[in-house]
Image (cartoon, rainbow, N blue to C red):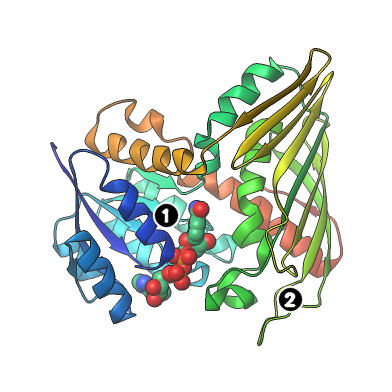
Amino acid sequence: MSRCKIGFVGAGGVALRHARHLTDIPDVDIIAVTDPDGSAACEFAEMTGSLAVPGVDALLDTSVDAVYVCVPPHAHGYIEEQIVAAGVALFVEKPLGIDVRTARRIADLAGENGVLTAVGHHWRYSEAASLVRGMLDDRPIRLAVGSWLDRVPPVTWWIKRTLSGGQIVEQAVHVLDLIRLFVGEVAEVSAYANTTPPNAPGADVDGATAAILRFRSGAVGTVTAACCLAWKHLAGLDLHADDISLTIHEDRLTARTPDGPLHRSLRPDDAKKAADRAFVDAVLGRGAGPAGILVDYPEALRTHELACAITESAVRSQPVRVCG
Ligand SMILES: NC(=O)c1ccc[n+]([C@@H]2O[C@H](COP(=O)([O-])OP(=O)(O)OC[C@H]3O[C@@H](n4cnc5c(N)ncnc54)[C@H](O)[C@@H]3O)[C@@H](O)[C@H]2O)c1
């Protein structure tokens, strides 16, 4: 395959971002898009020079090599099933869904069909990831403190639990994925929610959540989320190990060691672009190939299971053991 023909399911904000980044990658053609919102599909088709088609069947009929699924959390399921059944490479935006069952079914199907997959956990592609590894130099993390304290994002579905899955599943999942990368698997979570929704008409998601994590390694951690603010206050992760403290944000990494502080500015778009490039390279069989994909569907499933366990624990006000 010398060129990568890509289709899009969902033509909203994140689809447009991927499309902009994909046009900078050589040998990529965005050829088709489908979205029940006709005006979104037309705007996307016009911007990318692609064809707006009526559904996933029609999209697959255009003989795409890969499909980006950029739909709201509640819409995942049948879309991915059709794509993996056709044996077409799949890039899915996080979260994988609003429940674990749907995502496990898709993971199984993708595995059975040997389909190449990638998930939009772009934080793993940040330069911060390799810098942190180098600075830790195999020292185990003892404490992880993750946070996502923000306003309600400007998409209508976000404030409804049955549409978005809530803030932990929809948003803090980026931080959870980093936590898994650096600290390993979580054995058990205990979470509590402030169930008063954010101040938005019709909202029913929790306004804030606090979770305690017990890791298999013996490390401990916390994750806090809030969506009741009018600004983005904080989204990031603090890691503490012997004689080192690290703070990772999308746009900066800071570290403190006995040798003094270190500060590195990061460009968030670099990680997002790297995630797209890794996927295209894997589809085309160039560069690092599939090994360049840092978060495939099975890996993202483990992060999604952790997010769903925190949500379940908050609903039940009880500790929940994490599967996997
Ligand atoms: N990785 C990231 O940094 C990042 C950033 C933003 C959004 N996201 C994720 O991307 C997803 C979409 O977010 P968004 O901001 O683009 O939302 P959006 O509302 O702007 O766009 C979603 C689009 O999907 C369409 N859609 C809904 N159901 C569909 C279906 N069954 N088939 C086809 N299209 C359908 C909607 O009409 C809409 O145009 C969310 O899960 C979000 O968490 C990830």
Which of the 4 image quarters holds residue 245? Answer: top right
Residue at screen point 71% across, 32% down = 183
160 or 199: nearer the viewer: 199
> Is residue 149 found left or right of 152 in the rendered image?
right
Residue under pointer 1 = 92
The spot of residue 25 in percent (x, y) is: 26, 40
* Figure check: 7 above or below 187: below
Report, in whole angstroms, how far the alpha carbon at label 1 lies from the one at label 2. Answer: 28 Å
The spot of residue 24 in percent (x, y) is: 27, 43
Residue under pointer 2 = 198
Specify the amino acid type for callout 1: Val
Numbered disc in front, either 1 or 2: 2
Q: Quadrant of the C terminus?
A: top right
Residue at screen point 63% across, 17% down = 134
Helix, strand or loop under label 2: loop
> Is residue 28 found left or right of 208 in the rendered image?
left
